[in-house]
Image (spheres, coloured by chain):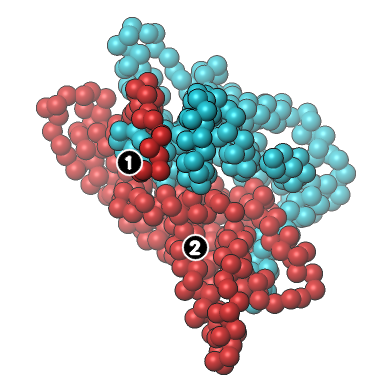
Chain colours: A cyan, B red
Amino acid sequence: MLLPALVLLVAFTHYPAVATIIDSFMSTPKPNRPSVFVGLDNYASMVEDPIFWQALRNNLWFALATIPLSIGLALSMALWVNGRMAGRGFLRMAYFTPTVLPMIAVANIWLFFYTPTYGLLEQIGGLFGLPSQNWLGDKATALASITVVAVWKEAGFFMIFYLAALQGISPSLREAAAIEGAGRWFFFRRVLWPLLMPTTIFVSVNAVINAFRMVDHVVVMTRGGPDNATSLLLYHLYEVGFKYWDQGYAAAITVVLLGALATVALAQFFVLDKKAHY
Amino acid sequence: MSASAFQQRSPVVDTLAAWLLAILWVLPLVYAVWTAFHPSEFSAKFSLSAPLTLENFERAWTAAPFARYFLNTTVLVAMILSAQLVLCTLAAYAFVRYEFRGKSFLFALVLVQLMIMPDILLVENYKTMSQLGLIDTLIGIGLPYFASAFAIFLLRQTFKGIPKELVEAATMEGASSLQILWRVYVPLAKPVYVAFSLVSVSYHWNNFLWPLVVTNSVNSRPLTVGLQVFASTDQGIDWSIITAATLLTAAPLLAAFVLFQRQFVQSFMRAGIK
């Protein structure tokens, strides 16, 4: 009974993970030159590849921005929607809708938003007399622009987990706090935040994984440009593997990505899980 | 509501902030709908007198084989979901009902997939697919996702919570192992199946990078890849048509979401809580 599922898992998760590591020490096969062992050559070319470093840097900035922003927004959304606010149903739907839409589709919409001269952002800016700005074409703003899209897509998804956790918290805690005369901020910081810790950890792990996995919008909106300003690791991997067909080098980049994810997994097991108990 | 008698009404500032954020959040969609339903000269001009039209949808539909893409995506999503439900139910049942050597090791092996998704291993998986001759086929897109660690994990948790007495009673009546699975476990796990199905369908409807890599013709391209090909092959900048195509792609999910909003939210919630 276990066998079919296990065979597929091994074939498409464990085998490729191991094969990637082996391939990262081999040269890329050519029609008349089979793959040979090249030691650390692929890693050496990675260290010398400025685009790799750029993609890594971009990815770290992307992660550093999306993770806290989307979690912070998700938490505020959940607190608002959980309270007795006017139009709660509409608010919840508005926040959650981006989650169910294809990233490819929404990226096209956002692309139009950002378009110079026609785009909505330009027109709004124009009303206030702001100068024209090519959001996706300018190296200074391109990465920030795609970060905004990622946060917009992700926050509503994380809101759901906070909302579920908030609904599990007994109302008597709030009553007790109110009787003690605790303010809203105090109640949040001393009661809700610690109680929500396991959710925050769960959401953070997901946010980290997503930060290394979300590239659909890069493909649609910038193709890593301008001048690699928005290239992320997985996008660079895609280009190396399927545009330049350099399998050996692509394997080396995959190993770096696997390493990043494994670190997250281990950190979750050994560090964060302990902090969740109070 | 009486339990939250002490819960104050949200202050006005919060309500304003919440609404402002919500409006920002739906703005891109509202904008897309506006552009898609109006002639292209109004795509960035807002006027109440702008005539409504379905022409953009017609032109998008005829400009690219969207009917075929829709068919591909539907078949793909149905295939992945049914394979997942069957394979993962069996696997989860085995983990719950039987004792065997290396069980916890095998389970740990399953959980590895939660961290390392097939998306990241696309170079190696592409090689495997070309060895199997499955490049540019729907099976080639779906196969890496058939065994879902997430589904196995979710179902194992649910199955574990099913009372032993029910299983014993069924055994007494002479039910076989598979009958017990079908008559006792599966019906009791129904909400979890619904939850997983919604999550799986929306994930695979939206999946892009792996299908992009594996497909290279109209015969197997799903909607997401089809939309990207359509939007990037010089439609000039006729945004009205591109947005219409975009909305077409998202429409079935959006409609399902609006209709079954509560189930969606609850499913995603249920799927996220371990």
B28 over B121 or under it: above or below:
above
- Residue matched to label 2: B192
| Residue B103 seen in the current view | yes
| Residue B17 location, quadrant | top left
- A151 or A267: nearer the eye? A267
Residue at image point 21% right, 27% down? B42
Residue at image point 26% right, 33% down? B35
Kind of element beneath mark 1? helix
Chain of the residue under the numbered disc 1 shown in the image: A
Which residue type carries mark 2?
Val
B12 over A210 or under it: above or below:
above
Residue at image point 57% right, 71% down? B162
**Quarter the C terminus of chain A occupies:** top right
Seen as rendered, the residue at the extreme bottom is: B174
- A20 or A211: nearer the eye? A211
- Residue matched to label 1: A89
